[in-house]
Image: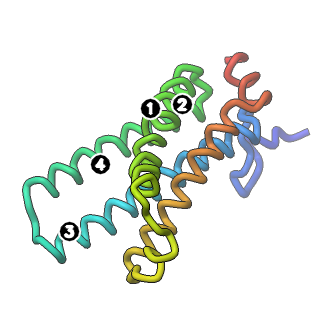
Amino acid sequence: MANTARSDPRGTAHPGVPGALRAACLMWLVAIGAGAVETVIGAAGELAGNGFSAGLAANIAVRAVVYSGAAALVLFLYRRRPWARTALAVLLGCVGLATLLAPVASWFAAGGDAGAALAAADGADLAYYAVRGVHIAAVLGAMAAMFLPSSRAALRRR
């Protein structure tokens, strides 16, 4: 019988990587991509309003480093390195998620009105809100998938 991991013409076989762990990796990549899109939308707005500045360049550079590091951690997670799960959980699942949620929570705490904000939003704002929603959902999904029993078992077997 042929080894399907090597002979699958679609390249879809992932030997030793359970579906839950693959799903976690995919969701982390979606979260990273959403963060990059948020950066582009925010930078475009900043450029349109205030022009280019050293602060904007620094912000983009820091985000590029963070997203590159996060992508590397996802690769290590896919390669079943248990420490990568810990790093992703702490850095992106806790610290990163807090940076996504804290501004929204403080805005609501200060009396923010979601209906009014949506009514006043332009296309860029609506795109940003949608991408931020995808970003948050992907982080939560990735966190859950990383700690499912099959993911935990795969990381222990390595």
> Which amino acid type is marked by label 2?
Ala
Depth check, mark 4 against mark 1: the one in front is 1
Image coordinates for residue 94, horizontal then vertical, percent:
50, 34
Reading the image, the residue beneath label 1 is 91
| Vertical arrangement, residue 147 with respect to residue 56, above or below | above
Marks 4 and 1, the one that precedes in the sequence = 4
Residues under numbered marks 2 and 3 in contact, where contact means CB atoms less than 8 Å apart: no
Depth check, mark 3 against mark 4: the one in front is 3
Residues under numbered marks 1 and 2 in contact, where contact means CB atoms less than 8 Å apart: yes
Reading the image, the residue beneath label 2 is 89
Marks 3 and 1, the one that precedes in the sequence = 3
Q: Residue at x 79, y 30 (%)?
A: 150
Reading the image, the residue beneath label 4 is 64
SS for callout 1: helix
Q: CA distance from mark 3 to mark 4?
A: 17 Å
Reading the image, the residue beneath label 3 is 46
Pointer 2 local density, CA inside 10 Å: few below 14, some 14–19, many at least 20: many
Quadrant showing the C terminus: top right
Residues under numbered marks 3 and 1 in contact, where contact means CB atoms less than 8 Å apart: no
Q: Nearer the viewer, residue 75 or 41?
A: 41
Quadrant showing the N terminus: top right
